[in-house]
Image (cartoon, grey):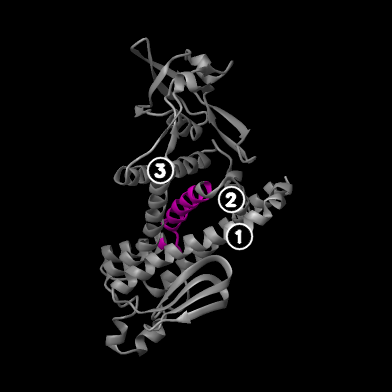
Amino acid sequence: MSLLLENLQYAIPTFLFLLTLLVFVHELGHYLVGRWAGIRIVAFSVGFGPELFGWTDRRGTRWKFCAIPLGGYVKFFGDEDAASTPDYRRLEAIAPEERARTFLGAKLWKRAATVAAGPIANFVLAIAIFAVLFSVYGRAVADPVVALVAPGSAAEKAGVKLGDRLVSIDGTPIVTFDDVRRYVSVRPELPITVRVERDGSPIDLQMVPQRIESVDPLGNKVEEGKIGIGTNQEVGNFRIETYGPLEAVGQGALQSWRIVTGTFDYLSNLVVGRMKADQVGGPIRIAQISGQMAKLGVAEVLNFAAVLSVSIGLLNLMPVPVLDGGHLMFYAVEALRGKPVGPAAQDIAFRIGFAMVLMLTVFAAWNDINWLFG
């Protein structure tokens, strides 16, 4: 609690800036592709609830900022609400030429492209931010050479020696020391095969990462897998690597993909009980981290924005009705059946999806409260 209050002057403005940016970019993806597809757009909203301020452009779209800044929406012509639920009664009453400009009246592929554009915009934003950071600030890296083996650790039990160079883990190439941490952290208590190079010869070592609870540099408790090795400047060759524009984009895409795979690794570990669900946070936790990032500088805020952008894009692609992924799931069924899913079935699915999202929101809020007062 004291940590959040200490960072409050940074947390609130930074959190609102990040959320506004990410929501705006997500909805802008829907808006731009929807407009390109010839769909009339009634409203573009950042936030929910009462409108604080806004304007209407020459195409008749109302651009507005609302009181509750926890999301946003693009409302298309013919929609009943902000969740793009079709207003079937209204659709039946309008003229055919006007119906063609509604979301439901658009061709299937145009609807799918419009829906997918939101999450894709979040991924593009993340890649762009990472690319700028890697071009301007570079990236701190170290060679995966062992300078420390903790007593009693998985690495010591497996026979890792000082000076060993890690080549691969489970067949995945290891280039930097951070690659080791990234791979091992999401695999607590899961057997892995580490190939090291010792005196010019490859050696395969079997070990099981230990589940360790520690405190990260920001003071947050985290639980992750560790094998108990470290490096230093002498053998790790700490350095800053910078990239040209094209290479930086490639590295940005790779970094975004690592976040995606890391998320799926965490979820799979969560399902089988290898990790706790208390690391799932909500707005309070995000606001607290936002404040900490703001105190560290612009680069850290942008890096956090990129991570959040990937997370928002990935979350929205989950096949849950009311989310973008749920809509895409319906379109896939429509493509297979040759006709849309019936209104009654969609209504039931959306109610279930809303309940699922609400439960996740409550669960994340509960974790935040426990973290805040724990």
Label 3 element class: helix
**Quick one: which residue is furthest to the front in this view?**
136
Name the secondary structure under disc 1: helix
Upstream in the sequence, badge 1 or badge 2? 1
Q: Earlier in the sequence, mark 1 or mark 3?
A: 1
Disc 2 to disc 3, how far (Cα)? 19 Å
Residue at left offset 43%, top offset 37%: 139
Instruction: Choose between 316 and 181: the one closer to the eye.
Output: 181
**Separation of marks 1 and 2 at Cα, in angstroms:** 9 Å
Judging depth in this view, the residue of 218 and 316 nearest the camera is: 218
User: Main SS type for the magenta part?
Assistant: helix
Indicate which disc residue 294 carries. 2
Q: Amino acid at mark 3?
A: Phe
Judge from the rendering whether residue 156 lies leftward or rightward of residue 196; answer left or right. right
Magenta highlight range = 300-324
Q: Name the residue tied to disc 3.
A: 134
Element type where label 2 sits in the image: helix
Residue 374: x, y in percent?
72, 45
Residue at the spot of label 1: 13
* Quarter of the image where one finds residue 196: top left
Identified by mark 2, the residue type is Ala
How crowded pointer 3 is (Cα within 10 Å; few <14, some 14-19, many 20+) is rated as many
Residue 260, percent across and down? 42, 46
Is 358 covered by the magenta stretch? no
Amino acid at circle 1: Pro
Residue 304 is covered by the magenta coloring: yes
